[in-house]
Structure formats: C-alpha cells, structure tokens
Image: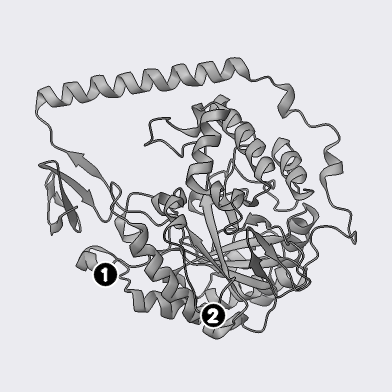
C-alpha cells in the first residue's frame, strides 16, 4: 500500500500530520494525532456505501437475533460460586518446576510434565499512566494472592516502549496502597509487581504491548508493529527495530535470575493496513528478537503472536519461527467476539459452532492437532453481563478450547481502565481490586484449568 506524509486542513485547523493512503485510486486520510478518518466519495458512491452498510447491519442484527433464539439463561447461572476459589495452601495446577521448554504441542517443565498456561492479563503499565492497575487500592502482594486464589498459574504483564525509554516518576496517588514504592519510577514499579507475582508462585510472561503509552489497539499505524520509523515524522514516539530490541534487553535484564519469569510475548497484535503486514516480515523480526533474549537467558519461552491482530497463524506450517536454541517457541492467538469481521463467515459473535471451529482450526488449532507447536490463546474475554453475540462467542470458544485443550490467557483481571476510570466490563474483580466476580466466566475457566 503506497503512502506519503501530508498536512491537511480541517475546518480551519491543522492536524499534526496526516498519512495519505492511496487505495483503489481514492485518498484516505488518517491523522496520526488525534486519529480520524475521512474518505472522499462523490454523492452516488456515498449513497451506494450507505446502502451496502445498511445491508450488512441488517444481516448482522438478524444474525444476532437468531443467536438469541438459541441461547438460554441457565448456562450463565452459577451454582455455588464460592467453590470456584482455590483453597489457600492446596496443591493444584499452580505448581511449576522450571525451566520450561516445548515438546510438540505442549509446554513442559523440568520433569517433562506439561505446564498448561492458565493465565490472566494484568494491564496498566502499557497505558498512559505507566503503572499496573490497582496499586492505589491494594498492595501488590494482595493482588497476587487474589490472582492465585482464582486459580491462575501465570500472568501476562504488558508494557509500552515509551515506558521503558522514558521511565517516568509514578505519581504517589497511583501507589497509595504500596507506600514502599512511592517515589519510584515506572520500571521500578513494574519490576516490583513481577517480583510480587513470582514470590507468590505465579509465572510471569512479559509482553511488549504497544509503542506509545496508550490503550491498544486503535487505528494508529504508529503502534501497529514493532517498528514505525518508516513513517518518518508521523509518530509521536519513533521506534526503530534496534531500539525495540534494546528496550527488550533493558526490561528483561531485570529478570534473568528469576526462574518464574518464563518468557517474552514479543509484540501484541501485529497488524498492517488492509493486510499489508506479511508473516515473513514479522517472523524475521521475531527470530532476531528471540535470539537476542535467549542470549540473556537460554530457557525463556519466546512467544510469537500471529499477524492480523494476532488472529492468523495459518502460515506457520510452511514458515515456522526458527531460533538458535530449539524448543523455545510458543505461538499465540487472540480470539474475541468481534474477531473474524473481515471474513466471509463474519464476526465470531454470530457464527455457528461449526463455522467457528473451522476458522479456529485454519487459523491456529492445526498446530495443536498435528502436534507441531504450543498455541497460547493470550487474549480472549467477555463481559460480566453478556449480550447475545458475546454469549454465543463465549460458548463456542470455551467448547473449542476444551476440545483442543489449549493454553489460555484471559483479558483481564482489571475492573477499571486507566483513562477516565472507565469500567472494564471484561474484568474479573470488583472495584476494590480484591473481591472476585465469580460468574460464568470463572466457572468455565476453572474447568479449563482442571483439564
């Protein structure tokens, strides 16, 4: 897709920079900051576009209505929710005997026994406040205990490149329940949270989530991949591959002696505009990054997400990731209700189970079924009070995850988002960052943990 930088006027005001994409002979202007999109059509084409969009919306809502007819409320009622909590001190799937490596489709420990990743995401450090959520309300050790009580054996902990490079001082009010961290910088807080989790016996996967410290993932191409320097002056935070690798080295050097920091999720949801991010591009960069990290600690797992926002691992069969040290690669896919929107089958919220399962097998599950490599579903989630599409997606996904016994990572533990303290409807904790929401999601994930 050809592109060039250009300034554009909008109602007498100039935006910082616009990227102009020439697509099918039409200009599409995407502002870098803030992000907006305007497409210039003549009136006839605009009318046709509205008619097309209307038809698609009608199809979508009809499909959602059909889904609603198939779902009952009984599935989402949980009997004895208190039984979903792991008794303190009990032996369960949290036990980990590092180091880990891969064996076919499985992640295995030092005894060559499978260690199934039953993970949850704890976000915030990658966002604009530069700090994992909840530290203003609960001590990090108490949050770690709550995560363990829910039965999760691992945490995916995102960071932004901006956090590593700027390493800002964290305001005291964001650390109100962690007085020993007041006056600390972002990296100090991140390391303290990692150490709290591993002290509790929880494995940690470090995740490079985004370049600029903000919510992921929008239309801003500056955050779409591990590097953005090819965009020139467009991006507020410029990132070359060499700087990206240096950031990885900086953050992982804190953990090379911590055996429960088990791996690195190299980059969140790599994507390009209209399919312009090819697996070959990303795979080459992932191999370079993986080898850099394995030179620091040879037993880390190197986690590589698929392209198309971590939806597509179909090319791995013919183009696998190859590292200097074998048996270290874990692939990762993300599956949400809105995923699949660009395909003929439509969004997963509206799919039948047969259609959904077919896409899962084609996109990533063949790697498990053919014993090629582990696949970790590093992000998926649904709201506490699901709508029909969410419910349909969740039932299909959990049924499928059970059938292939996949490793998983729920998004997210957080009850609130950083910006404007907006509710995180996918969260597993109440606003006090202590009380679990023991609903259908924890019931179903508890069953996955026991497989």
> Mark 2 or 1 closer to N-term?
1
Using the image as rendered, state which of residue 210 and residue 399 is in the foreground: 399
How crowded pointer 1 is (Cα within 10 Å; few <14, some 14-19, many 20+) is rated as some
* Front position among marks 2 and 1: 2
For this view, does 23 lie left or right of residue 307? left
Using the image as rendered, state which of residue 412 and residue 177 is in the foreground: 412
Q: Where in the figure is residue 5, as x and y percent of width and height?
A: 14, 59
Q: Where in the figure is residue 105, as x and y percent of width and height?
A: 63, 58
Residue at x 50% of width, y 79% of height: 324
Indicate the quadrant where residue 74 lies. Answer: top right
- Residue 185 seen from this side: no
Using the image as rendered, state which of residue 398 and residue 250 is in the foreground: 398
Residue at x 64% of width, y 52% of height: 408
Check if mark 2's residue and mark 1's residue have beta carbons within 8 Å: no
Residue at x 53% of width, y 56% of height: 332
Q: Is residue 187 depicted above or below 36 in this figure?
A: below
- Residue 279 seen from this side: yes
Q: Which element is circle 2 on?
A: helix
How crowded pointer 2 is (Cα within 10 Å; few <14, some 14-19, many 20+) is rated as some
Q: Where in the figure is residue 436, as x and y percent of width and height?
A: 75, 46
Q: Which element is circle 1 on?
A: helix
Residue pointed to by mark 2:
294
Q: How far apart are the alpha carbons under marks 2 and 1? A: 26 Å
Indicate the quadrant where residue 92 lies. Answer: bottom right
For this view, does 39 lie left or right of residue 272? left
Q: Is residue 90 depicted above or below 162 in this figure?
A: above
What colour scheme has been applied to the protein in the rendered image?
one colour
Using the image as rendered, state which of residue 386 and residue 344 is in the foreground: 344
Residue pointed to by mark 1:
229
Q: Which mark is residue 104?
A: none
Q: Where in the figure is residue 226, as x and y percent of width and height?
A: 38, 66
């Amino acid at each position: 897709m050809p592109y060039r930088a250009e300034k554009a006027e909008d109602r007498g005001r100039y935006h910082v920079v616009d990227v102009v994409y020439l697509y099918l002979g039409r200009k599409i202007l995407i502002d870098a900051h803030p992000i907006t999109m305007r497409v210039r059509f003549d009136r006839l084409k605009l009318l046709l576009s509205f008619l097309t969009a209307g038809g698609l919306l009608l199809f979508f809502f009809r499909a959602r209505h059909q889904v609603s007819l198939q779902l009952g409320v009984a599935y989402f009622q949980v009997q004895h929710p208190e039984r979903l909590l792991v008794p303190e001190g009990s032996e369960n799937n949290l036990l980990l005997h590092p180091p880990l490596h891969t064996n076919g489709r499985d992640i295995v420990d030092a005894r060559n026994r499978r260690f199934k990743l039953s993970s949850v995401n704890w976000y915030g450090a990658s966002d604009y406040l530069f700090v994992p959520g909840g530290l203003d309300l609960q001590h990090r050790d108490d949050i770690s205990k709550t995560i363990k009580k829910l039965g999760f054996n691992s945490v995916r902990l995102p960071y932004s490149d901006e956090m590593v490079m700027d390493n800002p001082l964290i305001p005291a009010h964001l650390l109100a329940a962690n007085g020993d961290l007041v006056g600390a910088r972002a990296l100090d807080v991140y390391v303290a949270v990692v150490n709290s989790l591993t002290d509790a016996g929880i494995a940690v996967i470090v995740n490079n989530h985004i370049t600029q410290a903000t919510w992921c993932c929008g239309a801003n191409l500056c955050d779409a991949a591990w590097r953005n320097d090819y965009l020139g002056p467009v991006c507020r935070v410029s990132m070359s591959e060499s700087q990206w690798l240096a950031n990885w080295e900086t953050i992982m050097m804190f953990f090379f002696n911590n055996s429960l920091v088990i791996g690195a999720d190299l980059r969140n949801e790599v994507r390009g505009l209209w399919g312009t991010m090819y697996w070959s591009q990303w795979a080459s960069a992932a191999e370079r990054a993986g080898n850099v990290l394995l030179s620091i600690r040879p037993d880390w797992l190197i986690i590589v997400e698929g392209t198309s926002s971590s939806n597509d691992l179909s090319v791995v069969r013919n183009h696998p990731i190859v590292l200097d040290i074998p048996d270290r690669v874990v692939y990762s896919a993300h599956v949400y209700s809105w995923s699949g929107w660009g395909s003929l089958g439509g969004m997963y919220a509206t799919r039948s189970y047969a259609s959904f399962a077919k896409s899962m097998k084609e996109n990533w599950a063949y790697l498990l079924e053919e014993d090629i490599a582990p696949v970790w579903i590093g992000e998926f989630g649904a709201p506490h009070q699901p709508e029909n599409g969410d419910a349909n997606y969740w039932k299909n996904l959990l049924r499928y995850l059970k059938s292939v016994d996949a490793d998983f990572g729920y998004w997210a533990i957080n009850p609130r988002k950083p910006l404007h303290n907006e509710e995180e409807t996918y969260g597993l904790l109440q606003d006090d960052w202590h009380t679990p929401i023991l609903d259908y999601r924890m019931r179903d994930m508890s069953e996955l943990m026991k497989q």
